[in-house]
DNA sequence: GTTCTTTCTTGATATAAATCAAGTTTTGGT
DNA sequence: ACCAAAACTTGATTTATATCAAGAAAGAAC
């Protein structure tokens, strides 16, 4: 718990500077969690009660259309996770979260975070800047799926996140890149 | 100017409730703008200095890859516009903005908005919730381009925003939906 | 109102990537 | 260690959509 909080503190302090009292109030509301591999963290249609910070493990986020799963992202140790829109708006989720490995970390309840936003300006700002960073990431993702070919997307992932190939089953990476598992496999063969 | 401010006030008050003094400080910083048709509002690579609120007209946002333009969205009267990530982070823009019609409204400078965020918690929150709404919209857009066929995307647009067909040239709508102008034209024929 | 430019349409052809299918390898459970 | 299930590979085939091309319609400029 101590160690995770330090990871989180580093992450938070990279964008805002709460004082001791504020940080105290903040940390008090986070609770540890721990899930097995392949645990459904958030169900489709459920209202997301938590905002997560991962200490160890990988979580994938996806949605379902006509019975098919589409991955929209993965979260790793040292990163946040959660179904952000469902969490923030407290409305049923269009997305689901699932662990790909044993995963542990800390999380905070919506009803514990909102009072922090109300009371402390610094966390309201943290919330704004967090949303902003997600927004920027989505923008990059959109550019990639609109303008790049399957091969370009594959190569970019290879270049920028080679570690991901060890952590995430390739059928999920294929889905994340918007291509079939077969196409992914063929590209992998080509570049190896 | 009076009228636009009322439009903006309605928009702002739908998510936060500034008091008179706060609202006063806020409105003072907005200035009117007016552009001809086909005016480049924000250039690629430029740092976005403004955040816009449109009173009349249409602005399209796009990026360029290998010389080809890709539309990512349109903003109409009563809506915000701007290159949000470049504005918020004050870094060179990956996107450009251009008017599709004569367009007017009001805008606020980055350097005028930030002090409002610093001074008034209510606007910090407005910023957070604004980012959140953009994030949600991007999520919907991502789902659509990943999971839907060209035809489904076309039909959804037809259903949800029929007015757009009058306002936006169809080559731009085609690009927005991630299909060629020819494919768009053929679908249009089919459903008419 | 005529001309020039841009946008839109329509048909023919090409192609990237999906789907189908069947085998192989890897992983997980007991 | 063995068996079952899941994940991955590879080839053959299909398909949605892009690209190419050339004419028609609409809008802008003078």
Image (spheres, coloured by chain):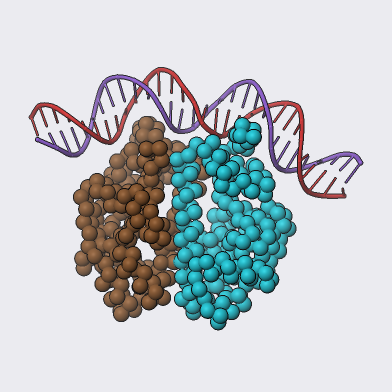
Chain colours: A cyan, B brown, C red, D purple
Residue B30 falls left or right of residue B14: left
Q: Position of residue A97 (x, y in %)?
A: 62, 56
- Asked where in the image residue A175 lies, by quadrant, the reply is top right
Q: Residue at x 46, y 57 (%)?
A: A135
Location of the N terminus of chain A (image quadrant) = bottom right
Q: Is residue A113 above or below residue B58?
A: below
Quick check: can you spot residue A68?
no
Q: Position of residue A84 (x, y in %)?
A: 53, 61
- Which residue occupies the foreground of this view, A80 or A93? A80
Q: Residue at x 68, y 57 (%)?
A: A57
Residue B20 falls left or right of residue C23: left
Q: Residue at x 47, y 72 (%)?
A: A124
Quick check: can you spot residue B57?
yes
- Which residue occupies the foreground of this view, B89 or B150? B89
Q: Position of residue B57 (x, y in %)?
A: 25, 52
- Which residue occupies the foreground of this view, B50 or A146? B50
Location of the C terminus of chain A (image quadrant) = top right
Q: Position of residue A156 (x, y in %)?
A: 54, 42
């Amino acid at each position: 718990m101590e160690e995770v909080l330090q990871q989180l503190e580093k992450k938070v302090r990279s964008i805002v500077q709460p004082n001791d009292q504020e940080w105290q109030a903040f940390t008090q509301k986070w609770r540890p969690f721990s899930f097995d591999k392949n645990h459904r963290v958030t169900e489709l249609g459920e209202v997301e009660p938590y905002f997560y910070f991962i200490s160890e493990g990988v979580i994938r986020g996806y949605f379902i259309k006509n019975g098919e799963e589409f991955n929209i992202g993965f979260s790793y140790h040292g990163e946040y996770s959660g179904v952000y829109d469902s969490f923030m708006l407290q409305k049923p989720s269009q997305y689901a979260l699932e662990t790909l490995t044993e995963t542990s970390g800390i999380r905070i309840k919506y009803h514990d975070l909102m009072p922090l936003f109300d009371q402390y300006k610094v966390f309201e700002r943290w919330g704004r800047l967090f949303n902003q960073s997600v927004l920027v990431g989505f923008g990059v993702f959109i550019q990639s799926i609109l303008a790049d070919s399957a091969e370009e997307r594959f190569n970019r992932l290879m270049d920028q996140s080679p570690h991901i190939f060890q952590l995430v089953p390739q059928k999920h990476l294929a889905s994340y890149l918007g291509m079939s598992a077969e196409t992914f496999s063929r590209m992998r063969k080509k570049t190896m």
